[in-house]
Each structure stands twice: as C-alpha cells, then as structure tokens.
C-alpha cells in the first residue's frame, strides 16, 4: 500500500498568499462486507488525539454506535512535537501507550504501513484506523472513517444505530461540505494566516457561516432531516469544532467576532450533543486546551495557557 502524493509536505503548508492549506489524507481504503478490509469485531484499532477535532469525530461516532467493544483505541499525548508529529505517553493522564504495535510515536505506525514513510517529508496525522489482521493503515481521513463505522452497525455490530440513513445521505454530505471550508477548516485558516488579507477573508467567511447555522437551528435540534431534524454525521462533524471554539479558537486563532455562547441556538446545539450518552467523556478539556496553546509556538511563543474562559460547555 502506498500513500498518494497529493501533498508531500508536513501536515500543513502555507502558500505565498499567506493562506493556510491543509494537506490531504494519504490512506483511503475502506471497510466493506466481503472486501479486503472486512467488517469484523476486534480487528480494527483507532489511534486518536483527544485534542484533535478530526480524531474526536471518530471517537464520538464509535461511542454513539456502541462500537466500544468492537474497535479498540489508543490516545497520543496532547503535546505535539516540534515537527508536528505525535507521541505516545502512558504516564500522561488521558494518554496511553501504543498497545497494538508498541511504537513510541505515531510516525512508527505510519512507517509500518508504508516502509518509506520515515524517509519522506510527510508527518502522520490522527485519526488512524489500523487493521490488526494485515498490519497496516486502512484510512486516516476522519470523514471516511465515521462513514465506515456506520457499516459496522448495518452488519449487526454495536447498538444498531445509524448516523447516515440512506435517505439522508445526500443531505448529510451537502451539510458537511457546506461547513467544512468555512467552519471546520475556517478556524485553522484564520489562526494560521500569514497575511492580514488571508486572515480577514477566512474569519469573515467563518462568521458568515456561523450566522447562517444559527438561523438554520432556530426551530431545529439537528442539522438535517425533517421537522426538528435527526442526529447524523453532519452534527458530529460540526460539533467537534464548536465545542473547541470558546475554549481555544476565540483567543488562539483570533476568531473573536463572537463566541459560540453568544449564539443561543448554536450553544444549545453544543449542549444537546454533550448530553447524549457517552459524549461528554470523549471531551478531555485539558488535552484540548493545553495542546493548542502549548504546541503552536509559532502563534504562542512562550506557551502560556490561559486560565479562562469561565463560561462555556467545558465548565459544566
């Protein structure tokens, strides 16, 4: 298996325009009944960071679908290394060792899947879905992993729930697409911008979309579906950005036109998701907050971690 060469830099690159550009995921295989990667209990292992919103999506989906006994998990240290890579650290509260492969770093996992990895300019990202049977990475794209987890439910594993009913799949995909560039990636484009123009463009688009979502949720509980809507992947993909917003992005990424707590419907949405069974335990507030302020020294030179905010979902 070879990763594609869509972008061979580190986990991000900045073009001359000063705009943040997120690299593409390299491993894009899928789990399917009768395929190379079949639907089997106990076969797959998930590597995540509590800090990362993309990895958080997969952990939440695993819990909501009742797959805890079918897909095992390891958690990296919240401290990102200087080159943007991740390490395992069983001595850090909330983090673990690599219980499957015994590697010290996530780079070791990637190198097992692709022998030339450590010699390349690439940096491994979370989440990673690992196949114990073939000893390789199946996929490292969060959106595809959560869709694959739904396949487990359809094959009788977990609790039988689905977060992607067939009749809503197009609506779900459209909503995720609409939120990705402006919101999910928008906070990063704002925070990592290297010119005023790039920052202004990103933060303006971010809050325009948040305003639209606030209006969309005026008489709804969930983003897609009829009437009040239905909980789907679209909600999970938005939630992991919103739940970090007031705690981190307002200050660290300069997304300070408004806070989520200033949007009544968006704040209610965040609290609604947090109140779902098994979700609050996936939100490790210290890992989330400390990771950003400590790891991004290009933004926060002296690694000062703010004491606040005193309000927000993280305080409940």
Image: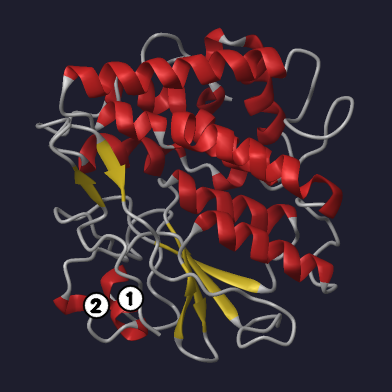
Horizontal and vertical percent position of residue 219: 81, 15
User: 23 or 65: nearer the eye?
Assistant: 23
Q: Which residue shows up at 32% across the image and 19% down it?
A: 201
Is residue 281 toward the left or the right of residue 232 in the image? left
**Dot 1: few (<14), some (14–19), or many (≥20) neighbours within 10 Å?**
many
80 shown above or below 36: above
Q: Is residue 280 visible?
A: yes
Helix or strand or loop: what does disc 1 sit on?
Answer: helix
Vertical placement of 43 versus 95: above or below? below
Q: Quadrant of residue 253?
A: top left
Considering every residue shown, the one lying at the far left of the view is: 301
Image quadrant occupied by the C terminus: top right
- 10 Å neighbourhood of mark 2: few (<14), some, or many (≥20)? some
Please give left or right for residue 85 compared with residue 211 in the image: left
Classify 139 as above or below 164: below
Q: Is residue 311 visible?
A: no
In the figure, residue 190 lies in which quadrant? top left
**Image spot of residue 167 (x, y percent):** 86, 49
Of the residues under marks 2 and 1, which one precedes in the sequence? 1
Question: What percent of the width, then of the height, locates residue 96?
Answer: 41, 65
Model colouring: secondary structure
Residue 110, numbered label = 1
Which residue corresponds to the image point at 71% horizontal and 80% vertical from the top-left? 39
Between 144 and 177, which is closer to the camera in this rendering?
A: 177
The residue at the far bottom in this view is 134
State the residue position of label 2.
117
| Mark 2 secondary-structure assignment | helix
Kindly indicate whether the residue at mark 1 contacts the one at mark 2 (C-beta within 8 angstroms): yes
Q: Name the spot of residue 164 as percent of width and height, x first.
A: 76, 52
């Amino acid at each position: 298996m070879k990763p594609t060469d869509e972008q061979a830099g580190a986990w991000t690159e900045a073009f001359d325009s000063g705009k943040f550009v997120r690299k593409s995921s390299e491993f894009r295989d899928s789990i399917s009944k009768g395929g190379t990667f079949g639907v089997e209990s106990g076969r797959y292992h998930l590597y995540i960071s509590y800090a990362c919103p993309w990895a958080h999506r997969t952990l939440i989906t695993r819990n909501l679908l009742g797959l805890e006994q079918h897909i095992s998990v390891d958690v990296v240290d919240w401290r990102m290394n200087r080159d943007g890579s991740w390490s395992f650290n069983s001595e850090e509260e909330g983090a673990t060792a690599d219980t499957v492969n015994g590697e010290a770093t996530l780079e070791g996992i990637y190198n097992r899947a692709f022998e030339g990895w450590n010699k390349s300019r690439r940096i491994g990202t979370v989440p990673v879905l690992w196949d114990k049977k073939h000893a390789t990475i199946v996929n490292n794209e969060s959106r595809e992993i959560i869709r694959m987890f739904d396949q487990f439910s359809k094959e009788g594993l977990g609790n039988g729930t689905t977060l992607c009913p067939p009749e809503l799949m197009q609506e779900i995909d459209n909503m995720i697409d609409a939120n990705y560039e402006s919101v999910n990636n928008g906070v990063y484009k704002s925070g990592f911008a290297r010119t005023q123009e790039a920052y202004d463009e990103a933060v303006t688009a971010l809050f325009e979309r948040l305003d639209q979502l606030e209006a969309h949720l005026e008489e709804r509980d969930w983003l897609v579906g009829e009437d009040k809507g239905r909980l789907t992947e679209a909600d999970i993909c938005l939630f992991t950005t919103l739940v970090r917003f007031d705690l981190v992005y307002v200050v660290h990424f300069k997304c300070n036109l408004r806070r989520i707590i200033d949007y009544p419907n968006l704040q209610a949405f965040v609290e609604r998701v947090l109140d779902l069974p098994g979700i609050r335990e996936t939100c490790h507030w210290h890992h989330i907050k400390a990771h950003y302020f400590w790891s991004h020294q290009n933004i926060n030179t002296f690694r000062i971690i703010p004491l606040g905010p005193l309000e927000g979902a993280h305080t409940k």
